[in-house]
Amino acid sequence: MTIAPNINYDIDDTKVWSALKHLTLVNFRNYKYLRLNFDKPFVVFTGENGCGKTNILEAISFLSQGRGLRGAKLSEIKTFDFLAQQQTSPTFINNNGWAVSALVKNGYDTYNIGTAVETQIKETNFKEYKETERRIVNINNQKITNQSELGNYLSIIWVTPQMDRLFQTSSQNRRSFLDRIVYLFDTNHSKRLAAFDNVYRQWLQIIKSGKINDNWLYSLEEQIAGIGVAIACARKEQIKKLNNFIEKNPDDIFPEAILMLDGTIEKMLDEKPAIYVEDFYKESLLSQRHLILNNITSDGINKTDLKAIYKKKNIPANLCSTGEQKSLLLSIILAQAQSLVEHNGFPPIMLLDEIAAHIDDAKKDAFLAKIKNLNTQTFLTTTNLFEFTKIKEQANFFEIKDNIVKDIFI
């Protein structure tokens, strides 16, 4: 694997506020070992489809909380054995997992941030063992106990081709998009989601087992209702703030979107106090145990949907053309990124995978110009290098072929 020379790059503090200066991948997807250096606000990866461009963006996305831009399981990411045999890596690399690390610039400070997978063997029954994997995170070589702390050092927003038709896919995809917006502003949101999933899973297991313990179920249902209403409140608050930002900061290129939450709990919070909604959630929803078990009911915060309206035309996003849907998505992404600057005091790093699809050159160039004004670093992928010749003076270019990454000049 090609390793970039260890040059002391220095990104201009007056032009870029948030950036990666170095990036290292170990056993990650098709990269046994990869080390890259960056010194420009734009970084472009070019190559044929399937060469590993998106894998690098996915690795960067793991420097933030969550499951990365693909939502992959930890076990799916490690380099396949047949690839490992074709590549060389430093002798100190532990081949049992994968790792990503970077030197991150935030304002005038720099931080070493790394994340890796740790494999553990747990005894489940007598003489029976199960191999489990968990993600660990270090900041300046200090292990942190919760991924949400990463939000204090950097934020990352991404756009992938799978998101182009966000408003025509499943509600689960839109709910994931919604929750990522929320926990970029509210780092505790991911803790609530994890706690809700854990309690809800326990509740379902008891019902499926047929061994009903009413006292235990009532206790779990109280927790589900309490955490669920807190999640709904956080979603409502952030969507309201984002809508207000969009209204006060109209865009001259991209269409204005109005975002709405479609969920029983969220709608009820418009008219009732949270304590009343908790009681409703617990008594009226969770009492329908047989319906929820068979996925018949559409109520609950794990069924909430995110809707968008193209304001100028007053039509739902899912009825818009493919190009309009992409423009609406970029409008929301821009508003999210710009409002994050106000909220955090620093801009998010942007990951744009095949961003030019479904938009014309004028909108693509306008979007990149608006991103550049955020004073952040942006990573892009393309199969056509000439799509980004207008930013060639401000970009590092890397070509990927046969698992080899090399910097190029255009």
Image: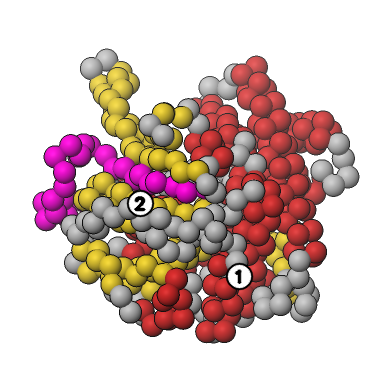
Q: Which one is in front, 211 or 116?
A: 116
Residue 57 magenta: no
Residue 28 lies, in percent from the top left, at 28, 50
Secondary structure beneath dot 2 equals strand
Task: Tell me if residue 311 comes above or below residue 78 in the rendering.
Answer: below
The residue singled out by tag 1 in the image is 370
Residue 340 lies, in percent from the top left, at 64, 53
Inspect the image, locate mark 1, and give the three-letter code of the amino acid beneath it: Lys
Residue 100 lies, in percent from the top left, at 34, 45
**Residue 159 located left or right of residue 142:** right
The extreme right residue here reads: 271
Residue 22, label in figure: 2
Let me know if residue 286 appears in the view.
Answer: no
Residue 95 magenta: yes
Residue 131 lies, in percent from the top left, at 28, 30
Report which quarter residue 320 is drawn in: bottom right
Secondary structure beneath dot 1 equals helix
Stretch in magenta = 79-106
